Image: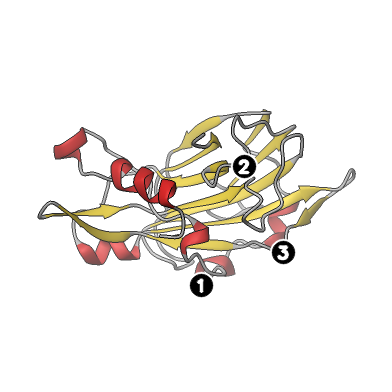
Amino acid sequence: MNHTTAFARIMIATLPAALFALSGCAGQAPQDGAEPLGTASEAWDQTCTQAAADATWTSTGNQTWNPTYGGTACYHAVVVDVDDLQVQNPNSANAGILMQWADTVPTNQADCEAAFVGAYLFNWNGSAWVWNGAAPVKAHGTWESFFGSAFCGTPEVLFTTSTTDSYGLSNGGTYRVEATARVADSSSAAEVKINVQTADGIQ
């Protein structure tokens, strides 16, 4: 992993339910290998800027959506607007706007590595949403081992405020994210629960 603190957080957060009684966990952050969106983006793209927001937050927020989110204006994706973003540790590699798998953790390697989260990021220019060139990004689950046990590190996408990354977020800015979580990177794949939240990061 590129960030030591991110690796530690991911390893702890993604332990299976038998170890930490968690039903969902964090996974792979975009700065650790996320790529431009593939086939899933064919059904939801930058035209989602015209969609009404599913949630509008001032400074911070945290919400989980059940499957069947998104409508005809933004197919299989949630749209979240954040006005006056405020995170506690903006220089942390873990701070920003986080989109993550929030459904049952896959229990086999094939399903884990197919698990998909993808997101677009937009900036507000005073009159319209403008696509941020650093997005779209996607992440897949990673099959991990820990003291002899195998488990799935579920996928996540983090648009970070850290100056070491290129997303350009900063406290006080206004942003829109469009995100989807699916069982595979395919426009026909079933969607699953997704969580979107502002992340304060590690100091």
Q: Residues within 10 Å of mark 2 (few under 14, many from 20)?
A: many
| Label 1: how many Cα within 10 Å (few below 14, some 14–19, many 20+) | few
| Residue under pointer 2 | 91
Q: Which residue is mark 3?
A: 133
Question: Whole-percent x and y of residue 86?
Answer: 67, 31
Which residue occupies the extreme left position in the image?
148
Looking at this view, name the residue that lies furthest to the right.
127
Residue 13: image quadrant is: top left
Question: Rounded to the nearest whole Å, what is the CA distance between mark 3 and mark 2?
Answer: 21 Å
> Residue sitting at 51 percent across and 72 percent down?
39
Label 3 crowd (10 A; few <14 / some 14-19 / many >=20): few
Residue 140, position as x, y percentages in the image: 39, 62
Q: Which residue is at 24% across, 58% downward?
A: 144
Disc 1 marks a residue whose amino acid type is: Thr
Q: Position of residue 187 (x, y in %)?
A: 49, 66
Q: Quadrant where the N terminus lies?
A: bottom left
Q: Nearer the viewer, mark 3 or mark 2?
A: 2
Q: CA distance from mark 2 to mark 1?
A: 33 Å
Q: Is residue 158 left or right of residue 58?
A: left
Between 36 and 188, the residue placed more toward the observer is 36
State which tag comes first along the sequence, 3 or 1.
Answer: 1
Circle nearer the viewer, 2 or 1: 2
Cα–Cα span, label 3 and label 1 = 19 Å
Q: Secondary structure at mark 3?
A: loop
Q: Nearer the viewer, residue 21 or 11?
A: 11
The residue identified by callout 1 is: 39
- Left or right: 25 in relation to 185: left
Q: Secondary structure at mark 2?
A: loop
Indicate the position of residue 200 as horizontal and vertical percent values.
55, 33
Q: Amino acid at mark 2?
A: Asn
Label 1 residue SS: helix
Which amino acid, mark 3? Answer: Gly
